[in-house]
Image (cartoon, coloured by chain):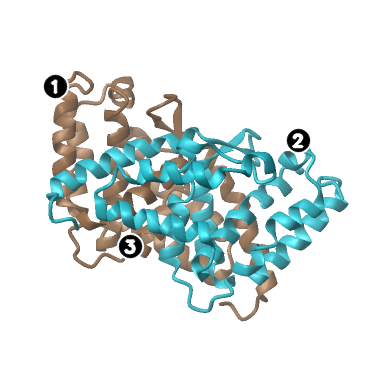
Chain colours: A cyan, B brown
C-alpha cells in the first residue's frame, strides 16, 4: 500500500481504472464466436483465456505453475489495446511498432491506479510480453491456443478471410509448446485436421 | 487426475467444455456498457469481475483472502446461465426457481469435464452460491458492485428502465458489506449520489 493514499482515496482511483477498462469490451478481434459468428471482443477473449487457464493448467510443462500469477497476467494482458488497438496475429505490417504503441498505452492505463499497484500491474504485463517465466509461457500458450480453437470451430473463419496458410499458423503458434507440450500436440493435430477439412490452406 | 483417462483423453474433454462455454458470450444482461451503451454479456461481466477482484482484493474484510479461489469462482459463476438464462437482480418473479434451474445447468455443463474436474468446479459453484466462506462473500460483493457501478456510469440505465428504487438497490446489494465493508461504504455513497443526480428513484 502507498502510505500517502487513504483506503478511500485508493478505492476512488481503483474505481476510475475499473471504469476505464470497460472500454476493452469495445475492442474487436478477427476471430468470431462459434454461435452468432460475430467478432469476439478483447474482454470476452480475456475471460475465455482465464477459463482455459483453470481448465488446462495440469498440462503446463512447469510442474509447479503459479496459477494465480498466470490468471493475473491473462486478465490484464490486452488492456493496452484500449489505446493501441488489436493487432491481428498474422498482420506482419502492423506488428512493426506494436510493442512501442502498447508500452505507451500501458503507461497511461496502469498509471490510473495507485502508484504501487500501477507498478505491480506494469511488471505483470512486462512479464507476459517477455515470455520468459513458466507462467508467462503458459499464459502465452493459451493466448495462442484459444483463437486457433475458435478458428477451427468456425470453419477457419479468420484464416480464410485473411488467406492464412498452415505453415504460417505453425510458425506463429509453435511457441505454445514452450508453455505446454501436450497442448501443442493437440493443437498440431487440430490444425492438420483443419487443412484436411479445407478450412485452412496447406 | 482421474486414472481412467489419459492426458490426451482429458484434453479432448476439456476442449469440448471450453468450446461449449463460448456460449456465455451470447447471454446478455440488463446492464449496458459505458461507451456504446449496448447490453453487456456474461463473459464480459465475468472478465470485469476478475479485474475487480485483483484490483480491490486489499479491501476484503478477510485479512488473508485466497485470491486464486475467488478468481476461480468468478470465472465460472455464470456458466449455468448458458442453460438457465440471466435473471435480472430485481426480477423477483423470475428469481423463484432460479437456483433449481441453475443446478440442473451446472450438472450438464460441468459434467462435460473429466469427472474429478467436474466435481471440483461444481463445488466451487456451490461455494459461490452458498456465500458462506470469505472467498464466496468477496466474490458476491464484486458481483453486486460491478453492475451498480455500470448503472451509475450510464445514468442509471437498467434502474430507470425497470423502475428500480433506492431502497430496493440497498436491500439487494447491502450484502456487499459481508465481503468488504469499505466497498459497501463506497457503493452507498455512490448510489446516494445517483439519487441526487436523478438517475435512481428515491
Front residue of B112 and A178 = A178
Front residue of B135 and B44 = B44
Residue B67: mark: 3
Residue B196: mark: 1
Q: Which residue is mark 2?
A: A161
Residue contact between numbered discs 3 and 1, judged by CB atoms under 8 Å: no
Q: Chain of mark 2?
A: A
- Image coords of residue A106 (percent x, y): 41, 45
Asked if B150 appears above or below B197 in the picture, the reply is below
Quadrant showing the N terminus of chain A: bottom left
Image point (69%, 43%), residue name: A92
- Residue that sits furthest to the top in the current view: B198
Front residue of B118 and A197 = A197
Asked if A73 appears above or below B161 in the picture, the reply is below
Asked if B187 appears above or below A50 in the picture, the reply is above
- Residue that sits furthest to the bottom in the current view: B3
- Image coords of residue B5 (percent x, y): 65, 75
Amino acid at each position: 500500500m502507498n502510505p500517502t493514499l487513504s483506503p478511500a482515496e485508493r478505492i476512488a482511483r481503483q474505481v476510475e481504472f475499473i471504469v476505464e477498462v470497460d472500454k476493452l469490451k469495445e475492442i474487436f478481434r478477427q476471430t468470431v464466436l462459434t454461435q452468432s459468428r460475430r467478432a469476439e471482443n478483447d474482454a470476452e477473449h480475456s475471460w475465455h483465456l482465464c477459463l482455459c487457464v483453470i481448465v488446462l493448467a495440469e498440462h503446463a510443462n512447469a510442474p509447479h505453475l503459479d496459477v494465480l500469477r498466470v490468471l493475473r497476467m491473462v486478465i490484464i494482458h490486452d488492456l493496452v489495446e484500449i489505446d493501441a488497438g488489436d493487432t491481428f496475429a498474422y498482420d506482419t505490417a502492423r506488428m512493426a511498432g506494436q510493442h512501442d504503441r502498447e508500452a505507451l498505452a500501458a503507461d497511461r492505463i496502469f498509471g490510473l491506479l495507485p502508484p504501487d499497484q500501477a507498478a505491480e500491474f506494469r511488471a505483470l504485463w512486462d512479464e507476459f510480453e517477455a515470455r520468459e517465466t513458466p507462467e508467462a509461457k503458459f499464459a502465452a500458450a493459451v493466448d495462442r491456443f484459444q483463437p486457433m480453437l475458435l478458428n477451427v470451430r468456425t470453419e477457419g473463419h479468420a484464416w480464410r478471410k485473411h488467406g492464412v496458410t498452415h505453415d504460417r499458423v505453425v510458425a506463429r503458434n509453435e511457441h505454445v509448446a514452450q508453455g505446454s507440450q501436450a497442448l501443442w500436440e493437440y493443437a498440431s493435430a487440430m490444425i492438420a485436421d483443419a487443412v484436411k477439412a479445407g478450412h485452412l490452406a496447406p
